[in-house]
Amino acid sequence: QVQLVESGGGLVQAGDSLRLSCAASTRSFSTYVVAWFRQAPGQDREFVAAISRSSGATFYGDSGDSVKGRFTCSRDNIKSTVYLQMTSLKSEDTAVYYCAAGSMTSTSPNYYNYWGQGTQVTVSS
């Protein structure tokens, strides 16, 4: 069983930056692919970014309001933590952000077995 705890959300103004953290309870953290999803009220859960196990290769969502170039996903396997650095935030980025862990990289939430409780990000315009 893997427990994930997100932190770092909050209320910011458009153009500001935030860094989200996802801390995992497992010592085998480096064996998991970790992804970030977000969900705005009334909308489906949307893939934001994912980072591979060992190489640290990253993948970003490209649908709708793209986060490419604004968000950066990274991981520290020693600290069992994944980060999502968000810059140039827009009001459209307002959502609950979740981290998830699984065994393969996918943009579908169905491929991730473990989820955090989510952290709210609100961007005022």
Image (cartoon, rainbow, N blue to C red):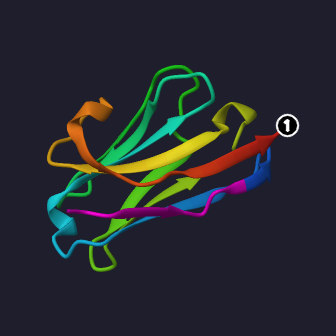
State the SS at label 1.
Answer: loop
Magenta segment includes 95: no
Q: Which image quadrant for residue 62?
A: top left
Magenta segment includes 9: yes
**Above or below, 79 relative to 28:** below
Which quarter shows the N terminus?
A: bottom left
Q: Which image quadrant for residue 22?
A: bottom left
**Above or below, 24 relative to 39:** below
Say which residue label 1 marks.
125
Q: Residue furthest right?
A: 125
Q: Which image quadrant for residue 66?
A: top right
The picture places residue 114, in percent across and down from the top left corner, at 28, 51
Residue range highlighted in magenta: 1-10
Q: Is residue 109 left or right of residue 91?
A: left
Which quarter shows the C terminus?
A: top right
The picture places residue 121, in percent across and down from the top left corner, at 66, 48
Name the residue located 41 percent from the left edge and 55 percent from the top edge. Answer: 116
Q: Is residue 29 left or right of residue 35?
A: left
Q: Is residue 60 left or right of residue 27?
A: right
Q: Nearer the viewer, residue 77 or 42?
A: 42
